[in-house]
Amino acid sequence: MDNKQLKRKILTGLTALCLSFPLSYGMTQIPAAEAGWESLAGAAIGGAVAHSQLNSTLHKYNDTEQGRQELLAQMKKQYGVNYDSYLNNQLHRIMTNLTKGIGAVDPSVYKKPYNYFINNQKTFNAFCTLGHNLSVNTGLYDVLQNEDEIAVVLAHELGHGQKDHPAKGARRALNVQIIGAATGSQAGQIMATVVNNRHITKPMEREADALAFDYITHTGYNPGACAAVWQRVMDKSKGHASAFQKFMSDHPANDDRRNAYAKRLNQYSNGHVTNNDGVIKVNTAVFCTPAAAGGMSAKERAYFVMGNLAAAYHNGHNTRAAYADGNTVMLGQQPIITCTSGDESAQTLADRLNKIK
């Protein structure tokens, strides 16, 4: 067999192999007749074909409506669908709000509307993959009940979608793996894993975190939830690390994410509001130390108070007087904190806020 015939045989075999893999979660065995390729020729030729096939597959499932719907249907079949009416109504409301928030800074969101559903997986996770297909694990609701915090997690995933991270991650992973492929058969196996895994890098995770803050601040959700959600995950993971192990292994550290959001909140308040281990300060003077309440730890709840104050300063409500409306401290039209039995009284906090704001 001459070199031209060998190349034709390799190309034909690998192309057929790649076409059999686009969305399969298994590893199909390569026919024995195709497995004896020389390492260099197999990797080089296989790599070229794998790139071509990957681009074709990504275009179909990422950019065409037919492919997007096919992938959505396969995701539902793979992971199951949770039809709980309360959770689904909440998800629809969150996605509607977030779409409007994203649209305020990135109108391209309307060109490829998101598909979304709740799956039956019990682990703590949500993910956005090719074609703006998003899914939320049922297990996420075992950890998060507050709608603002759930919205933050979904805003993060939509950040991945808006920046096309799933497709970019797939291309990056293919480039890396082809370099190390010893044979064309391995290039075919690479296709089986690259298309089905997100391959999202930590820099991409940080970019999605930053985008989530921008999106949330263009909705009615409390921007403090961005930090609060990671404080909650830290609180819940104590003694239950195994339940969060896979999620935390490929994401930035939870305390780093929380601290980065706390810094963003300070900036959003134009430097007026800080949170030091649950102690909220306004213009360097102590305002309050919120107590644990409503299923939240004291530290988690403090970020919600910080978020309300940051929004008040960002939107100019600080020019108005603070006052007590029942148990709620108001600053202009912005609610700051609804006091519980573990807090100081709303009137006491309103008087203090007027002195330091």
Image (spheres, grey):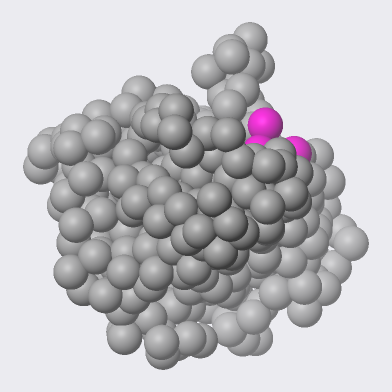
Q: Nearer the viewer, residue 286 or 186?
A: 186
47 or 335, which lies in front?
47
User: What residue span does the magenta drawing correspond to?
Assistant: 249-253
**Residue 211, image x, y percentages:** 59, 70
Does residue 105 sit above or below 235 in this rendering? below
32 relative to 334, above or below:
above
Q: Tell which residue pokes out farthest to the front in this image.
A: 1
> Can residue 182 be seen by looking at this rendering?
yes
User: What is the magenta segment's predominant secondary structure?
Assistant: loop
Residue at image position (86%, 59%) is 285
Q: Is residue 104 magenta?
A: no
Where is residue 339 drawn, in percent x and y? 51, 44
Task: Give the farthest residue toward the top.
Answer: 239
Q: Residue 300 at x, y = what percent?
A: 61, 39
Quarter that holds the C terminus: bottom right
In the picture provided, is 16 more to the left or to the right than 78? Answer: right
Examine the image and state in which quarter residue 291 appears.
top right
Residue 355 image offset from top left, x and y in percent: 77, 68
Q: Is residue 170 visible?
A: no
Horizontal side of 197 relative to 356 (left or right) equals left
Residue 220 relative to residue 135: left or right: right
